[in-house]
Image: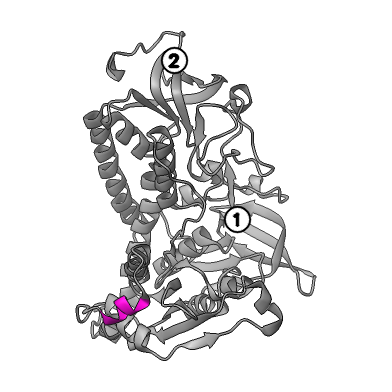
Amino acid sequence: MSPETLSQTSLSPEELDIVILGGGTGGTVAAWTFAGEGRRVAVIERKYVGGSCPNIACLPSKNVIHSAKVASYFTRGREFGIVGVNGGFTTDMRAVRERKRKMVSSWNDVYLENYKATGAEFVIGDGRFVAPRTIEVKLPDGTTRQLRGENVIVNTGTHATLESIPGLADAQPLTHIEALELDEVPSHLIVLGSGYIGLEFAQAMRRFGSNVTVIGRNPRFLPTEDDDVSDGVHRLFADERIDVVLNAKVMQISGKSGESVTVHFEKNSNGGQKTIEGTHLLVATGRTPNTQGIGLELAGVELTANGYIKTNERLATTAPGIWAIGEVAGSPMFTHVSIDDFRVVHASLTGGNRVTTGRKIPFCLFIDPELARFGLSEKEAQTQNIPYRLFKIPMVAVMRATTMAETRGFLKALVGANSDEILGFTAFGAGAAEIMTSVQIATSAGMPYTALRDTILTHPTLVEGLSPLFTSPPKFHHVPADRAASV
C-alpha cells in the first residue's frame, strides 16, 4: 500500500517502515532517502515544510543578513568611489521581509516536490506518542491518525529559551522567528544574549539603521573561543557602533517590545543596578529541547538531566526501535550535524557502522566578516596538553581581500608539532566558511598541511590565502615540562 492510499481517519495504527516525528532537515533528508530506497515513510510536522532551517532559521536569517551587507555598502560608498546623490539611505523592512519570504516559499516548493518524487508522505499535524513506536496525529481538520513504525525517528528540535526573568514574558519579546518578520527598523533594539543568533541579528539590524545594544552574561564575547577571536569580534562591533554590555545579569524587564521596553541589569563585576531603554527586545539566550508534551514517557524514551533525549553513540534511544537526531538529541545545534546524525541512524538500519563520537564538526558565525572554525582551537590544544605549530596571517596578506577592501581578520591553523597533520583551523574574515571548508576537506582526506601549501591555487581568490598562511614562519607551542608526562 502506498503512503498516498493510507487512511486519513482510521484510529487503528497504520503500519509503516519509518515514522519521523519532526520535519527538520535531518528528518527531511531521512524521509527522502529511506523512501527512495523503497521504504514506507511518513514525516509528521506541526507547521513548516522542511522544519526550521529553510523557514525560520538558517536560510531566512542569512537572506536578511545579506540584505544588511548590501546596506553596509551604502555607508561605505565613498570608499569604493560611489557617491550617492542625496547621501545616506533608508531601509524598507517590508521589502527585506518580502525578499526573504519569496526565498522561503521557493524552497517550500522544492521540498514538496522532493516528497512527491520520493514517495515519502508529509503529514501536517500535532504528533505525540501513545504507545511504543506509535504516534497519534491530530490533523488540521480535527481528525486523527495513528502511525506505527518499525522504526521511529524523533527530530523535534528546540525552541528559544525564555528565562524566568521578572517581566520578560509580559514584555512579549522577539525571538528569531518574530525578528525575521519585522516590517520596520527598530529605533533601538536591545538583544539579550551574545551567542550566534544574538550577534548575527545585532549586526544586521544595526546596518539597517537601528541603534543596537547587546547584553551578555559572559565577561567576553564568545568566551570558549581563543582571545584573538573574541577580541576581534568585539572590536568589529565597536567599530560598527553597536553598544555592548558584558558580564551582566538581567534582573527585570519592564514595558513591551515594539513600543517601549526597559532592561534592568547588574554588572557582575561591581554590582549596582543599571537600566537600558529601547523600543524592541530580542531574546537569544539559548535553546530548550522540544521534548515536553509529545508522550515520550509512553514510548519508553528517557531524557537527560537537561531535558534532551538520551541516546548512545548510534543515536538509539532507551526505547527499542526509536532513534533521535538533531538538536533534540543534544547534538551540536547545526543543520549540517542533523544531516550527519541521519547518516548515523541510516547506517545502523542498513548494516553500516557510523557513530557520533570523534566527529570534527565545523561551524560558522555569519556576522560580517564571518568566523569559521573546525578542529582544535589554541585554548583546546593547550588544555589537552597537545603541542602544536601555529601558522597565522592577517587577512590583509590575502591579495583578493585587498581588492575587496575586506581586510579585517585573520587566518590561522594549528599543525602538529611533530607531524604535518592539521589539528585545527580558524578563519575570521571575508569568505571564512569557504576557506575553512577547503582546509576541512583536505584534512578529512588525510592530507598534510604541505599539500595545501604546495597546491597551485587560483589567483586571485580568497582560498589562495592558504598559500601565504602555510608558508609563513610558524610559532611553536610546547607543552610545559610539568605537564609533558600526560601527553
Identified at 28% across, 30% down, the residue is 37
* Image coordinates for residue 313, horizontal then vertical, percent: 53, 44
Q: What segment carries the magenta color?
A: 449-454
Identified at 40% across, 10% down, the residue is 9
Task: Categorize mark 1 by other alpha carbons within 10 Å: few (<14), some (14-19), many (20+).
Answer: many
Whether 449 is drawn above or below 123: the answer is: below
Considering the whole magenta stretch, tell me its main secondary structure.
Answer: helix
Secondary structure of residue under mark 2: strand
Secondary structure of residue under mark 1: loop
Which mark is on residue 285?
A: 1
Q: Quadrant of the N terminus?
A: top left
Q: Amino acid at mark 1?
A: Thr
Mark 2 = which residue? 145
**Residue 150 magenta-drawn?**
no
Identified at 45% across, 68% down, the residue is 373
Tell me, yes or no, if residue 126 can be seen here. yes
Marks 1 and 2, how far apart in space?
37 Å
Task: Categorize mark 2 by other alpha carbons within 10 Å: few (<14), some (14-19), many (20+).
Answer: many
Q: Earlier in the sequence, mark 1 or mark 2?
A: 2
